[in-house]
């Protein structure tokens, strides 16, 4: 059985690589379905030793409004990564990697379940700047196969190596509210009135429904953060878990395939 699982896992890795990480592709979906039938752990949501750790997402990111690049990375607007909390919301970035630390919080069986996105700016307003968006979340088991996940806030910060680099000045200017000045000196078009109205309406809904608090001013190391006082709560089903691989699926989200770091 172990040998069969190893072969099925290898097939899944190959299919993900062949199809750009798209879990909706029939070949990838078939590989997932074959593997989850061989899950070696019963009631995985309760198996904290197997669940805890640092995980790396192998599939394509599932944030909205993506555009796939030739190198299989994906282009997004910064606002799509974290509830439009960070500006410029229309800043174009590519995602370099997504990781997820799952560790106990010391409060019952609650665990941190953050989504950590490393990105590079490709927009002319900040070409080459690299940073991290952390969507902060808490999870706990609802039953043996299901986790509840609550998002509680987020942070935006430069990559550590950027803090010691001359580019930190560009980062501070772009993300501290000076982006309009930077944008005016480039050919990047400003958001249209319709786009600004849509963003404003979306932010208002987030404030009313989820208690999205104002984003903090940028601090001395280039970090900004926000809190959500009425956390959106979702359910996540654990379909496969072993020593080095985890496969989950949300209520309205595609499959997520993660490998232990």
Image: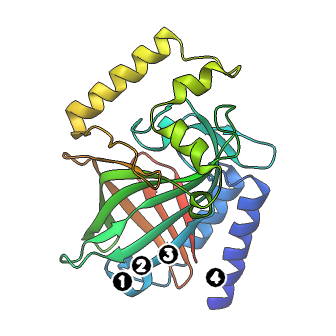
In what element is the residue under mark 2? helix
User: How far apart are the alpha carbons under marks 4 and 3?
Assistant: 22 Å
Q: How crowded is mark 1: few (under 14 residues within 10 Å), some or many (20 or more)?
A: some
Assign the N terminus to one quadrant of the image.
bottom right
User: How far apart are the alpha carbons under marks 4 and 2?
Assistant: 18 Å
- Would you say residue 155 is visible in this rendering? yes
Which residue, given by chain and number where applicable, does mark 3 sit on? 54
Residue 176 location, quadrant: top left
The mark found on residue 9 in the picture is none
Tag 2 near tag 1, CB within 8 Å: yes
Q: How many marks?
A: 4
Instruction: Identify the coloring.
Output: rainbow
User: How far apart are the alpha carbons under marks 1 and 4?
Assistant: 19 Å
**Residue at image coords 71%, 56%:** 27
Q: Which of 146 and 106 is in front in this view?
A: 106
The mark found on residue 5 in the picture is 4
Q: Earlier in the sequence, mark 4 or mark 2?
A: 4
User: Residue 145: percent from the left, percent from the top?
Assistant: 35, 70
The mark found on residue 47 in the picture is 1
User: How far apart are the alpha carbons under marks 3 and 2?
Assistant: 9 Å
In what element is the residue under mark 4? helix
Residue 196 location, quadrant: top left
Position above or below: 89 against 146: above
Which residue, given by chain and number where applicable, does mark 2 sit on? 51
In what element is the residue under mark 1? loop
Disc nearest the viewer among 4 and 2: 2
User: How far apart are the alpha carbons under marks 1 and 3?
Assistant: 15 Å
Q: Which of marks 4 and 3 is nearer the N terminus?
A: 4
User: How far apart are the alpha carbons under marks 2 and 1?
Assistant: 6 Å
Assign the C terminus to one quadrant of the image.
bottom right
Q: Earlier in the sequence, mark 1 or mark 4?
A: 4
User: Residue 108: percent from the left, percent from the top?
Assistant: 18, 77
């Amino acid at each position: 059985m172990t040998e069969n699982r190893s072969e099925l896992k290898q097939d899944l890795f190959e299919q993900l690589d062949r199809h750009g990480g798209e879990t909706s592709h029939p070949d990838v979906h078939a590989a997932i379905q074959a593997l989850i039938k061989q899950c070696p752990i019963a009631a995985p949501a309760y198996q904290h030793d197997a669940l805890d750790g640092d995980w790396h997402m192998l599939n394509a990111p599932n944030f909205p409004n993506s555009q796939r690049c030739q190198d299989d990375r994906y282009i997004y607007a910064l606002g799509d990564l974290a509830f439009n909390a960070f500006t410029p919301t229309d800043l174009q970035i590519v995602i370099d990697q997504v990781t997820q630390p799952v560790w106990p919080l010391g409060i019952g069986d609650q665990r941190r379940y953050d989504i950590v996105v490393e990105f590079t700016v490709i927009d002319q307003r900040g070409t080459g700047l690299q940073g991290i968006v952390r969507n902060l979340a808490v999870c706990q088991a609802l039953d043996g196969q299901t986790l509840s996940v609550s998002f509680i806030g987020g942070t935006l910060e430069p990559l550590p190596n950027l803090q010691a680099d001359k580019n930190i000045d560009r980062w501070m200017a772009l993300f501290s509210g000076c982006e309009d000045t930077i944008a005016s000196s480039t050919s990047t078009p400003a958001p249209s009135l319709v786009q600004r109205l849509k963003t404003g309406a979306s932010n208002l809904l987030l404030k009313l429904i989820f208690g999205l608090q104002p984003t903090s001013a940028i601090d001395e190391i280039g970090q900004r953060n926000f809190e959500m006082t009425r956390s959106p709560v979702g359910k996540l089903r654990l379909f496969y878990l072993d020593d080095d691989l985890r496969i989950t699926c949300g209520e309205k989200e595609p499959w997520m395939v993660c490998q232990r770091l």
